[in-house]
């Protein structure tokens, strides 16, 4: 797939703002009105200068423009895989930019280890890590159930199913699983399955 000529982020934003505005069927004045309602405060004249590439967009304006245009901020930077961005005296492809902004990987010219360490809290668990976590908490759950023989088989099965779902179905995609989520899942299972007389 042939790449386009590398362009600074501001130029890509300018072309994307215009393209998305036209796609919505809005005039520059209508977009400016939407920005005003959202607290962006950009006049119609400023919209025209942004689209012409003669006025740069601040970070606040970039995010508010994305909201106003019903798009993601990333959609204003790179539209498809052929886009190439000039950044820090380097050329960055659209896929590289997407992975970087969504914290999936560092840019080719960054320190990958430092990047991973800085974003470790947001990196998703791999399938292998999920399986390892499931095994670990299954062992803990088994030990707990062994200590409480009064718990019925049906409740035991509910505990195990709830544990598996808590590990396999991450509530927030891209966020690491927290042990507290498992504790809450087990607590919910216990309260839902507890008999009216308070016994298991």
Image (cartoon, grey):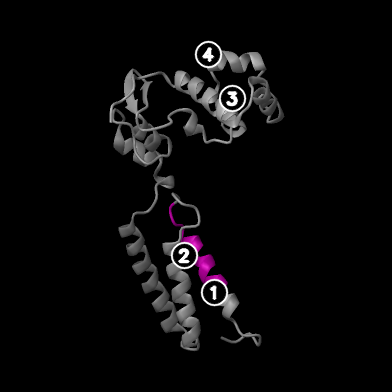
Which residue position is annotated with label 1? Answer: 189
The stretch in magenta equals: 176-189
Q: Which badge, 2 or 4, is on the more N-terminal residue? A: 4
Please tell me whether mark 3 or mark 1 is closer to you in this view: 3
Cα distance, mark 2 to mark 4? Answer: 50 Å
Residue 184 in magenta stretch? yes
- The answer to whether the residues at label 4 and label 1 have Cβ atoms under 8 Å apart is no
Residue 61 image label: 3
Quarter of the view holding residue 35: top right
Position above or below: 173 against 84: below
Give the position of the N terminus as an image quadrant: top left
**Most foreground residue, 39 or 46:** 46
Residue 168 picture location, percent across and down = 42, 63
Residue 71 in magenta stretch? no
Q: Is residue 54 rendered to the left or right of residue 27?
A: left
- The answer to whether the residues at label 1 and label 2 have Cβ atoms under 8 Å apart is no
User: So how many labels did they put on this image?
Assistant: 4
Q: Which badge, 2 or 3, is on the more N-terminal residue? A: 3
Residue 166 image label: 2
Label 4 secondary element = helix
**Most foreground residue, 11 or 90:** 11
Give the position of the C terminus as an image quadrant: bottom right
Cα distance, mark 2 to mark 3? Answer: 38 Å
Which residue position is annotated with label 4? Answer: 52
Given the current orientation, which residue lies at the most extreme top position? 54
Residue 21 picture location, percent across and down = 58, 27
Residue 14 picture location, percent across and down = 50, 20
Q: Residue at x 46, y 18 (%)?
A: 11
């Amino acid at each position: 797939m042939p790449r386009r000529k590398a362009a600074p982020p501001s130029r890509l934003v300018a072309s994307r703002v215009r393209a998305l505005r036209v796609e919505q069927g809005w005039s520059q004045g209508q977009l400016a009105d939407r920005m005003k309602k959202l607290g962006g405060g950009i006049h119609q004249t400023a919209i025209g200068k942004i689209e012409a590439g003669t006025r740069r967009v601040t970070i606040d304006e970039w995010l508010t423009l994305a909201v106003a245009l019903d798009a993601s901020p990333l959609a204003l930077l790179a539209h498809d895989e052929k886009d190439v961005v000039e950044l820090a005296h380097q050329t960055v492809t659209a896929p590289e930019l997407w992975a970087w902004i969504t914290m999936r990987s560092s840019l080719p010219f960054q320190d990958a280890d430092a990047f991973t360490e800085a974003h470790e809290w947001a990196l998703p668990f791999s399938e292998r890590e999920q399986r390892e976590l499931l095994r670990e908490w299954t062992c803990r759950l088994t030990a707990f159930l062994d200590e409480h023989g009064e718990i019925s088989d049906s409740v035991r099965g509910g505990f195990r199913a709830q544990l598996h779902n808590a590990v396999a179905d991450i509530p927030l995609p891209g966020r690491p699983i927290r042990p507290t989520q498992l504790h809450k899942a087990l607590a919910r299972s216990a309260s839902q399955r507890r008999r009216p007389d308070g016994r298991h």
